[in-house]
Amino acid sequence: MRKTKVVKVKNLKIGGGNPIRIKGMLKSPTSKKSLLLQEAKALQREGAELLRVAVQSEKDTKLAQFLRKSISIPIAADIHFKPKLALLAIKDGFDQIRLNPLNITRKKDIKEIAKFAAEKKVPIRVGVNSGGFKGRLTPLGIARQMVDKCADYIKILESQKFFDIIVSLKSADIESTLAANKEFSQNFNYPLHLGITASGPRLEGVVKSSQGLGILLNSGIGDLIRVSLTADSLLEIQVSKHILRFLNLRKFGPEIISCPTCSRCQVDLVKIVNILEARLKRLELKKPVRAAVMGCVVNGPGEASQADLGVAFSKKRGAVFKKGKVLHWSTPSKAIDDLIREVKKDGF
Ligand code: SF4
């Protein structure tokens, strides 16, 4: 894994071998404060470790104080076009600000922000998105421009002795995101916030984000992820957790291994898995537990026995396994109760 400098956003350490962090984004209008707060609480509860708020006006810079009354995770202000808002967001208590090198460009402004951020110990994310470039560019052309813009910006910040920098290089295209982040990581040791921007509708966005972030994370690149979907912000956190969990980078409570079902399956496995998933979620387990639910004897006993717990169905009955051993036989209607009982007994 690539070891970067550690940047602290409030009390959250990012980079340097710390766990890959999950960032969430508030989507409610900032004018609807109760909705915004509700969303922030839900994202924190789901596992977001840092929250990003779009700061578009002087009124929005007060949101850090408002959210902090009920939210314990750090809050980042996403700022475009107006350097004054960056200064106000720092003054009004945001824990991090994001600057876009494509729309806050005057050296004088950048230096002033860097000085004030250093004084208040507020880190800056330098975030470049492919959407900021005009014209038709090749994926590698986009990557080149993103890295160059970022490098120029970093030079200005460093000239002010400002080093609490996190970088994001996001494109709607996987190829350019990979190329930009790979190149950046070879030349700089600032932590990388990864994301595929404007990733598309729900299903496409989930696949594109999983592929793009998965490839980078698996090569040791990336210190924080923010999944962007044209969908609910809660789903973005859930997908982030799945990406990290399936790469064995983080552990988050229960994981269900279930087969896709086929003509051999003689029980309603989809229903069983859905009920099990809901009941495990209600238990709010913090420790990881792998529960396998398999439709027949082809792969069932193997998967069930490799998990912490499992049930492998054979015709209308299911063998309940725990740590590789068959405990007893059960029925589809009782199997879930049996698994849940064992989960509670072992206090996972
Ligand atoms: S485990 Fe059995 S039921 Fe499930 S997909 Fe495989 S063969 Fe089909």
Image (tube, rainbow, N blue to C red):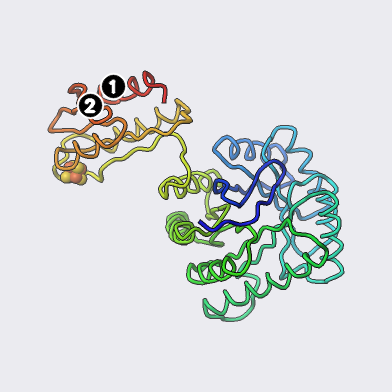
Residue 338, which numbered label?
1
Q: Residue 187 in the image: x percent, y percent? A: 61, 69
Q: Looking at the picture, does residue 288 appear above or below residue 154?
A: above
Compare residues 160 and 246 and report the one nearer the observer: 160
Image point 81% across, 62% down: which residue? 161
Q: CA distance from mark 2 to mark 1?
A: 8 Å
Which image quadrant is residue 198 in? bottom right
Q: Are marks 2 and 1 in contact (CB under 8 Å)?
A: yes
Q: Quadrant of the C terminus?
A: top left
Task: Determine the secondary structure under disc 2.
Answer: strand
Task: Determine the secondary structure under disc 1.
Answer: helix
Q: Looking at the picture, does residue 42 appear above or below residue 245?
A: above
Image point 65% across, 66% down: which residue? 128
Q: Badge 1, how many Cα within 10 Å: few under 14, some, many 20+?
A: some
Q: Residue 243 in the image: x percent, y percent? A: 45, 50
The mark nearer the N terminus, 2 or 1, is 2
Image point 85% across, 51% down: which residue? 119
Could one spot residue 146 in this view of the protein?
yes
Amino acid identity at mark 1: Asp
* Label 2 near ligand 1 (CB < 8 Å): no
Compare residues 77 and 325 and report the one nearer the observer: 325
Which image quadrant is residue 114 in? bottom right
Image point 26% across, 37% down: which residue? 306
Amino acid identity at mark 2: Val
Q: Badge 2, how many Cα within 10 Å: few under 14, some, many 20+?
A: many
Q: Residue 54 in the image: x percent, y percent? A: 71, 53
Q: Label 2, on which residue?
A: 320
Q: Residue 19 in the image: x percent, y percent? A: 55, 46
- Residue 36 as seen in the image, left or right of residue 333: right
Compare residues 151 and 140 and report the one nearer the observer: 151
- Residue 136 as seen in the image, left or right of residue 163: left
